[in-house]
Image (cartoon, helix red, strand yellow):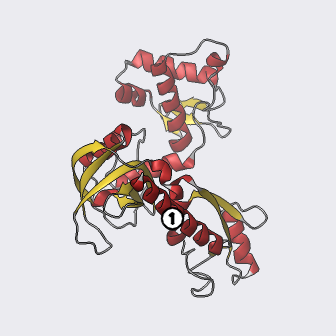
Amino acid sequence: MAVPVRAQKGNVPRWGVLRRLEFIDFRLFWTGRLNRSDLSELFGISAPQASSDIALYQEMAPDNLVYDRGQKVYLRLPGFKPAMIDEVVDRFLLQIIAVRRGWLKKTDTWFDELPPLEVVALQTLPTDAAVLQGVLDAIREKAEVEVHYSSMTGSAATRRRIAPHAMASGWDRWYVRAWSAEHNDFRDYALARISSIGDSRPRSVNPVSDLEWHHRIELELVPNPELDPDRRKAQEIEHKMVDGVLKVPCRLSLAFYLMAEHKLDVEAGKLTPFQQPLVLRNLAEVRQRREVAREMAKQALAAAAEA
């Protein structure tokens, strides 16, 4: 975040004022206009206080806005440079998606009007707040909990005892990384497939043995060599590759999700270049290191059980 002029001089505005200055910056940057009533209505302040906030913002960034008497609105000037917020595009786009998908209320954002937007995504069962609360409690309290879980592996058991130690997100889903009492190993559980959480007790396994989680590897992504030179160059530009390679640091246990999302786990040549524009240059190394880490974790768990 940029530092206000007054803050640079040691006279830092109060937190509430800073938030309103950020709002002014946000609205001007993304919508190009601002009314005094926007501040009054969103923050529940008086018109004089809103005028004072805008005046302070003008003092900080005089080249960012001008008052149009005809429209009775403040307008963004062509040379606008954010004074309070960073130019983080993802924050804007992700909030729009969240509003459209019902994850966030528009009134909880700083948007005025949303641009026309359609989100193409499969509807998934929302996670129960009590389930997420129980998982977070188990992680924090280092506990094992009994969960009711709908498995995709064909296992008939629906009640599982797991010891969660972390969470992960991949492939548009949330997962719980946990030790499984049923399998005596560490694995991922889709958060949305946990329907309830039962009793808990202190965990019996130390997550330090989860070597797939604790070890990292760099995934080395390169354009599919079967693409023509122009399309290979487009991939390099899109993914900001250095010397034709995109190196993505990743936990071994999470590499699968990135690989599956981009079809990186498919051997080169089995898909068309347009279906697989990126390939994983070190696919064999990733697979080998995951297998080694998984085997070492099993040995550590077996040794701990015998101790």
Q: Which residue is mark 1?
A: 294
Residue 171 lies, in percent from the top left, at 45, 63
Query: What kind of element bears circle 1?
Result: helix
Residue ranking furthest to the top: 11
Q: Which three-letter amino acid code belongs to the residue tagged 1?
A: Arg
Expressed as whole percent of the image width and height from the top left, the position of residue 254 reads 51, 60
Residue at figure coordinates x 37%, y 41% from the top left: 142
Q: Please state the horizontal and vertical placement of residue 86, each as a whole percent of the image.
A: 60, 38
Could you say where residue 129 lies in the image, as x and y percent from the top left?
A: 26, 46
Q: Nearer the viewer, residue 85 or 77?
A: 85
* Residue 240 or residue 249, whichever sits in front: 249
**Above-or-below relation of 200 to 285:** above
Image side of residue 216 versus residue 166, left or right: right
Q: Is residue 199 above or below residue 170?
A: above
Taking the view exactly as shown, the residue that stands out farthest to the front is 307
One can see residue 254 in this view: no
Is residue 149 or residue 210 the one in the foreground? Answer: 210
Dot 1: within a 10 Å radius of its alpha carbon, few (fewer than 14), some, or many (20 or more) residues? many
Based on the displayed image, in which of its 4 quarters is residue 275 positioned? bottom right
Q: Can you say whether 140 is above or below 286 in the image?
A: above
Quarter of the image where the N terminus is located: top right
